[in-house]
Image: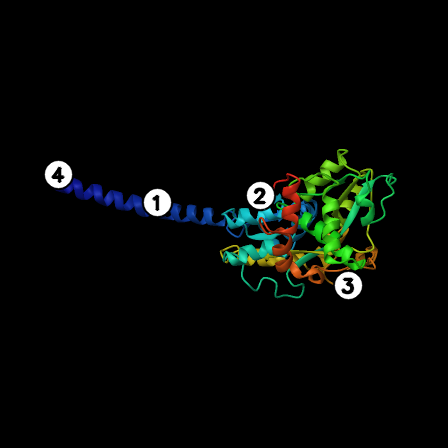
Amino acid sequence: MSVLSMQKVTMQTRRIALILCLPAVVLGLAACGSSGGSGKQLALVAYSTPKSAYEALIPAFQATPGGKGVSFTQSYGGSGEQSRAVANGQHADVVNFSLEPDVERLVKAGMVPPTWNQNATHGFVTNSVVVIIVRKGNPKHITGWSDLVKASTQVVTPNPFTSGGARWNIMAAYGAQLKEGKTPAQAQAYLTALFHKVVSQDSSARNSLQTFLAGRGDALLGYENEAIAAQKKGEPIEYVIPGDTILIQSPVAVVGTGSTSKAATDFVNYLVSPPAQAIWAAKGYRPVISGVAASSKFPTPAGLFTIASVGGWKTVTKQFFEAETGIVTKIEQSLGVSTAK
């Protein structure tokens, strides 16, 4: 057989082998495609306190048609820190922050659509109120804001330049003074006096709670839901709901428009559904929709107010937390506390 004939036979043999292999290759690709092909992984980036709630909410969502095959990565921390991390490149499909401005930062970055809060709950997923958490038996007899600035009282609250919860605490204290009839100048003086009683400022509300449970301070300013959760765990604490306090409204939003956006939207929609709101309520959060049976267990303070009543977050952020010129910025700097973001 000539060399040319041998080459033709070899080429034919290769073609036959390739044809015989094609079904296996196709089957192999199909197998790869069917292995988790319908699954999606969502990256949830949230502020520190709802971690335990999501331990119940995520499995409940995965049991729904919209959540079938959806897995999650989760990241928790101070609201401001988390928001800046996402703006700087940390991947997120869903964000749940403590403050509306932390979502608006992502809107300005083109990562969250401007319509994120144009729904029935105005973009909010939970409500809560600022409370004063005290030791079991309330040995210092703390009943309201005025008791926090007494000589013997030591207060714990997070750092407002990393923690959204801390900003809620500050605006609750400030707004309460106005509700009591004090002038803005007097309310600012109260904040100065309050910060002189603060003995610890952690990076997040959750870390401040751990500091308080470890024995630091006489009173902790924090979320009502955190106090409820700590009590359920048997921690030796009580909490006081001041007659004048602020309604905490925490936002949730879908990030981006990629391949996971439908699953992310389904998850966000689930979080404000009646079944999910019942789970939130069981974890100590006040529902943002009507008709949730557990709503009745949350008392409404006589002087409950919203952030809008003290100017709204845009005004408040500039007035109180602006770098160098903010009221709280100056107080913190005078005490040697970091205002770095």
The residue sitting at the top extreme is 214
Spot occupied by residue 250 in the image (x, y as percentages of width and height)? 67, 55
Is label 2 in contact with label 3 (beta carbons under 8 Å)? no
Q: Residue at x 82, y 52 (%)?
A: 242
Residue topped by disc 3: 291
- For label 4, the SS is helix
Residue topped by disc 1: 21
Q: Is residue 32 left or right of residue 58?
A: left
Alpha-carbon distance for marks 2 and 4?
79 Å
Alpha-carbon distance for marks 1 and 4?
27 Å
Q: Looking at the rendering, which quadrant does residue 245 occupy?
A: bottom right
The residue sitting at the left extreme is 2
Q: Quadrant of the N terminus?
A: top left
In the image shown, does 101 or 114 lie closer to the viewer? 101
- Chain-order first, disc 1 or disc 2: 1
- When the figure is inspected, residue 210 is found, relative to residue 297, above or below; the finding is above
Q: Looking at the rendering, which quadrant does residue 238 occupy?
A: top right
Spot occupied by residue 59 in the image (x, y as percentages of width and height)? 66, 48
- Chain-order first, disc 2 or disc 4: 4
Spot occupied by residue 209 in the image (x, y as percentages of width and height)? 73, 40
Residue topped by disc 4: 3
Spot occupied by residue 122 in the image (x, y as percentages of width and height)? 65, 63
Is label 1 in contact with label 4 (beta carbons under 8 Å)? no
Residue 340: mark in rendering: 2
- For label 1, the SS is helix
- For label 2, the SS is loop
Q: Residues within 10 Å of mark 2 (few under 14, many from 20)?
A: few
Q: Is residue 260 left or right of residue 320?
A: left
